[in-house]
Image: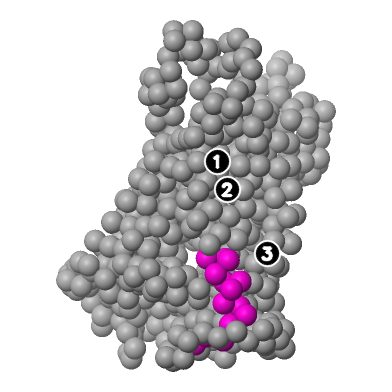
Amino acid sequence: MTIIQDLAPPPEVEVRPRAVGRRERWQLRLPLLPALIYTIVVTQIPFLVTLWYSFQSYFWNTPAPAHFTGLSNYKTVFTNPAFRGSLVRSVVMTVTAVIVAMILGVFFAILLDRKFLGRSIVRTLIITPFLVMPVAAALVWAGPMLDPNFGLVNYLLQPFGVHHVAWLSSHALGSVILVMIWQWTPFMMLIVLAGLQSQPSDTLEAAKVDGAGAWATFGELTLPHLRPYIELGILLGSIYLVNVFDAVKAMTQGGPGTATTNLPYYLYEQVNNAFDIGGAAATGVVTVILTIIVATFALRMFARVFQFEEAGV
Amino acid sequence: MTAVLVRDREPAGLRLRRVSGQVGWGILAWVVGIAFFLPVLWMLLTAFKPESAAQTWPPKFIFTPTLAQFRLVFSGWGPYVTHSLIATTVSTLLVLALGVPAAYALSVHPVPHWRDGLFFFISTKMLPIVAAIGPLYVLALKTHLLDSIWVLIILYTAMNLPVAIWLIRSFMLEVPKEMLEAAELDGAGRIREMTEVIMPVISPGLVSTALICVIFAWNELFLALNLTVTNAATLPMFLISSVPQEGLYLAHLSAAATVASVPVIIIGWIAQRSLVRGLSMGAIK
């Protein structure tokens, strides 16, 4: 279990040197084209159309055709506190969930890295939350777990002086984040565990012989070794968690008020409740621009994470 | 004599400490594992309760199990599960059909700018599809794809294709160079190289790729909710719609959640090892 040198040049299989002709180049490209064209058409055209509609006034529940309105949609985006609020909540939700899930993931991975009776069963138990359908997880948390009158959580917290707390109204954002953490901790754990198990045992033995304590060994040997794995987990976790919609929709419908309305839910409401295609498109364009800024860094991180061995780390 | 005794006793004491440490570690791990699994367990338990036993204070742990909730779920989920199965299966097959040749062109006989190609694919994964949802709705409406299973198949394929290409590519890089060279010396063309050398090596990898695609497509809600109504509504939508408007149906909801989740849970349990590699897009072997 190691992170492979994925971006190292592929194996050179040419048996004899050949001049690469035009025909040959097309032969190389041909297998790539269907997937490339498909991805360009399906993923880029909607964004071009989004750009187009962002300058239009278009409400799909009225018969009036779309008409050009210049920058007015954008003006609304930047002056409307709802957009800023949902952006901030998206960031808060993603960052909190990713960090806490990673900390728990590291802890679980350390637990599972040692041999004990029934290790594979415990591992299976811990990865299960990740496999539960996200809507199902959200509904089970919202109902049987967090229900103020019959919920298991209130029952278990009773000895600590908790009495029938209505979690989804008084701690809505925290409840949604809790479910995100619960679902994504196993993902982080799996990646960190792979890192732990790839650690050469002789270095650890040597540290032990040298009289290094458990904490020192962890801080000075294990943690640096885990770094690329942790980065990879944070990167991939963020990509998925920033788009979290299911938990919000199934648990709180963005409420109470707008307490849990993140960007995906805000866009969903613009389209489905306000019927405002133009406004949603402008919000979308701004979101995409922000994403591109973040993604530029993320892509660089990708390149680094995937070839760290090449660099001799 | 004493020295010998002491030396004999030392390791015994140490061993005791080591064993008890191991047991303590095991107990801690089990407690943590069960606590983390508890919501799933509670979902399963609640699913087998009659509705009256699901809504009690304190919550009931002992009750007469019933299959009534499951019967209720199975009576209503027919069209939803069919749509889910079609969207998941067809999109996964499409992903493999497009992904295998693309991964080949990015690994075995790489195109000139293969690195840019790889990053193009992964960058589409970072573009939030939610941002385009309004226009996607209009596009689907105008192309008469709204509320058709094809709109989900098309979008799920695009959603999973980048991950699949990265993953399949990582498996193709593992095909021994010598095997490719030998095939070439034998005069094997590209097609034979693919069918006779590469496919046998990567087929387990294709299975794990397919599993990852199945998980993501099966669980997808956002696109289904926005772009389908009845003709293509999938299982996650069935779950959303089983939240009743008034009153609480905790047991019914748990049964529906269980039924919808079980296929992926079982797939994931069986394919634990390939799960890590798949989720990390091939970065972790």
| Residue B224, visible in the rendered structure | yes
Point out residue B193 in the picture as x, y percentages from the top left corner.
43, 20
Q: Which residue is identified by label 1?
A: B166
**Left or right: where does residue A173 sit relative to residue B138?**
right
Chain at numbered mark 2: B
Taking the spot 57% from the left edge, 45% from the top edge, the residue there is B280
Q: Quadrant of residue B7?
A: top right
**Left or right: where does residue B78 sit relative to residue A98?**
left
Q: Residues within 10 Å of mark 1 (few under 14, many from 20)?
A: many
Q: Which residue is identified by label 3?
A: A291
| Residue A101, visible in the rendered structure | no
Instruction: Check whether the beta carbons of the residues at disc 2 and disc 1 lie within 8 A of each other.
Output: yes
The boundaries of the magenta stretch are: A46-59
Asked if the magenta segment contains residue A48, the reply would be yes
In the rendered view, how is the structure colored? Answer: one colour
Quadrant for the N terminus of chain A in the image? top right
Q: Is residue B55 above or below residue A119?
A: below
Q: Residues within 10 Å of mark 2 (few under 14, many from 20)?
A: many
Q: Which residue is identified by label 2?
A: B121
Instruction: Check whether the beta carbons of the residues at disc 1 and disc 3 lie within 8 A of each other.
Output: no
* C-alpha separation, residue under disc 3 versus residue under disc 2: 16 Å
Q: Quadrant of residue A209?
A: top right
